Image (tube, helix red, strand yellow):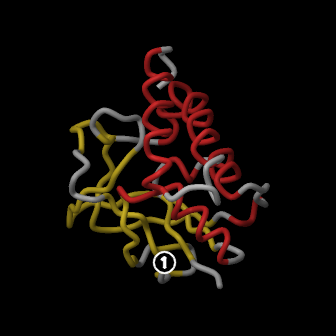
Amino acid sequence: MSTRYFFFGTLMDRDVLELVLGRSVADDAFEAAALYGYHRVRVRKDSFPMLVADPGASVDGIVYRTRNAEEDARILFFEDFDYGLLPCRPRTSEGMVDAMFCGIDTAVEPSDEPWDLETWGPRYKAGFLRLSEIYMDCFGRMTPEEAEPIWEKGRLDLVAKGLL
């Protein structure tokens, strides 16, 4: 099984994606893409983004195809229960492609602050990688619901240290 995903946030970062997948990723595994009908903002109280429907806007990102069902499971674990898998049709250099993206659950609040990877990286990447490492260590041992308190404790600890 293989799934094509459109990543628009932290999973566009090679280090984050490699940590989530548990393996290195080749340069040619990423394909630049744009998803129309949305704009990207920071999630309120966190450093990562979400998409908000906006018919006149578009979001840059990447298309990535998983190798197998385990990679799908790792991505879905990472995105956990705050995100739902939704179909989309991003545009790549070869035209529109069918893909999936992890859309935010309505219980998560958007901020008014735009989000982009280049701004996020210098300020938040190191802390986010540490938090993601803690969380992904739970993969295969816990459900996302069981691992959520570990994420939240780690997040609060890193916020207190000024890393998130």
* 8 on left or right of 62: left
60 is higher (above) or lower (below) than 163 = below
**Where's residue 1, x and y in %?**
65, 85
Judged from this view, the residue extending furthest toward the top is 161
**Where's residue 90, x and y in %?**
44, 73
128 is higher (above) or lower (below) than 162 = below
- At horizontal 43% and vertical 25% (from top left) the residue drawn is 156
Choose top left, top right, bottom left or bottom right for residue 44: top left
The amino acid type of the residue labelled 1 equals: Ala
- At horizontal 68% and vertical 48% (from top left) the residue drawn is 19
- Mark 1 surroundings within 10 Å by alpha-carbon count, few (fewer than 14), some (14 through 19), many (20 or more): some
User: Circle 1 — which element?
Assistant: strand
**Where's residue 102, x and y in %?**
41, 64
Judging depth in this view, the residue of 142 and 126 nearest the camera is: 142
Judging depth in this view, the residue of 147 and 94 nearest the camera is: 147
**Where's residue 42, x and y in %?**
33, 41
- Total marks shown come to 1
Judging depth in this view, the residue of 43 and 143 nearest the camera is: 143
* 133 on left or right of 62: right
To which residue does mark 1 refer? 99
Choose top left, top right, bottom left or bottom right for residue 38: bottom left
- At horizontal 56% and vertical 27% (from top left) the residue drawn is 122
- At horizontal 35% and vertical 63% (from top left) the residue drawn is 103
